[in-house]
Image: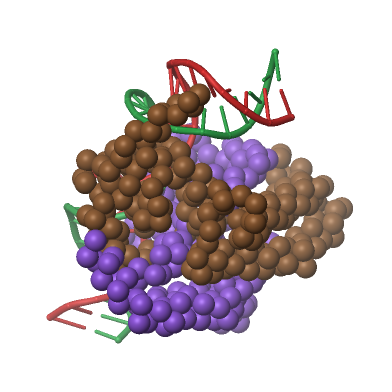
Chain colours: A purple, B brown, C red, D green
Amino acid sequence: MVDVKTVCLGVLSEGAASGYEIKKKIEEGPYSLFVDASYGSIYPALTRLAKDGFVEFHTAEQDGRPDKKIYTITQAGRLQFLDQLARAPGDDRYRSDFLFYIVFSDLIAPQRISEMIDEQIARYRRKIQMIVDCTKTSTRSADTQELNAAGRFAADHGRAILEAAIRHLEENRHLVEAEALMSREPVRASAAQTAGI
Amino acid sequence: MVDVKTVCLGVLSEGAASGYEIKKKIEEGPYSLFVDASYGSIYPALTRLAKDGFVEFHTAEQDGRPDKKIYTITQAGRLQFLDQLARAPGDDRYRSDFLFYIVFSDLIAPQRISEMIDEQIARYRRKIQMIVDCTKTSTRSADTQELNAAGRFAADHGRAILEAAIRHLEENRHLVEAEALMSREPVRASAAQTAGI
DNA sequence: AGAAACATGTAATCGGTTACATGATTAT
DNA sequence: ATAATCATGTAACCGATTACATGTTTCT
């Protein structure tokens, strides 16, 4: 599995940036769908990369803002990154509390289940909106990172998956909601059992 | 995010099992799509749960096989599990080296890209097959864990997402493959640059 | 007035993986 | 023969998160 150092090299291979900017890029862009890293891992990663000669930095003084350390990838860094890309990618990892909870939906109050599904759909919609926002080439601002063909592909892939997830939830939610409804009478006994035993 | 202890409580709430069997259930069943845990985390988790009174166990001697510790969830354990389910589920986490690599497909050899996509589709198909296998009520063996409505829902949800992912890859792979093809001539220069600089 | 954004960094902690250790049985 | 399955457990290690520390400016 790709570590934070490699993620930083990847971002920096597309242009110089500070640690703060790297964090923003991976939490806003299409990256956010399949990459994760906190400041607490990015800053030490950059320090380490600099020590190893894979990146260089210069301190940029700003008026009214804290100083910035602008990191630039080196030749050695580019080679290091190519080495990583030559290795077989690790398996995808998907962890979902939501689906885990759903498996035990008979232990959760019916209205809570519905609420959870609503929230999950809302989360998915928010992510889709974020992808749409960063995909459309904004005519006004230059700060939006322009996506190349590969970036658009990754973003669209994420969107396709999220839309399928929403569609499935909307079309089949009655199956987990109905179970509770159908057993409304019996459920009292089983809820009492669950709580009582 | 749900931890291994809670995953164990969830599995045990559906029936007694050994650590080994818990591991099998979460790597074979529909769980495998959204849950992960190694022996190195399951065994200590069970030890801890027993210490806290959330599970009990008895040692089952077997002929020709190592002894088993069969764990059973206690009343306290059921309540503990309900407490967890009452908390808001954590955000889904999806990590994909594959998509990260794709973003940098201009740094990877064209035939390698195609290979990676083929492999990714194959992985997805294998997962779908696994879901299908554990979803269909097998008439022969009783060892297949029978899925309730919620389990089937979770399995179908996973299948729907995987199928959408495959569809998108098959319909759009030319966009990342074509980029390399189109720039076959120029790419030599840029590849030399990349390697040279 | 207060929150949010900008900006970097460290220390404590944590949850989990990997590798190791052991060993019989069954399937190929 | 050899690999895979069954079965449990520990120790070393690792990568990453969280919280803390600090301080200005801009937006609401």
> Is residue B155 shown to the viewer in this render?
yes
> Is residue A24 shown to the viewer in this render?
no
Would you say B75 lies left or right of B139 here? left
B108 in relation to B43, above or below: below
From the top left corner, tell me how far across and down residue B81 is, in percent: 30, 59
Would you say C5 lies left or right of B64 here? left
| Closer-to-camera residue (A97/A53) | A97
In which image quadrant can residue A192 be found? bottom left
Q: Residue at x 51, y 44 (%)?
A: B24
From the top left corner, tell me how far across and down residue A92 is, in percent: 58, 52
Q: Residue at x 41, y 44 (%)?
A: B17
- In the displayed image of the protein, which residue is found farthest to the right? B185
Would you say B171 lies left or right of A147 here? right
Q: Residue at x 59, y 78 (%)?
A: A167
| Closer-to-camera residue (B45/A195) | A195
| Closer-to-camera residue (A142/B43) | B43
Q: Report the number of numbered marks.
A: 0
Q: Residue at x 61, y 50 (%)?
A: B141
From the top left corner, tell me how far across and down residue A147 is, in percent: 63, 67
The quadrant of the image that shows the N terminus of chain B is bottom left
B117 in relation to C21, above or below: below
From the top left corner, tell me how far across and down residue A183 is, in percent: 40, 79
The quadrant of the image that shows the C terminus of chain B is top right
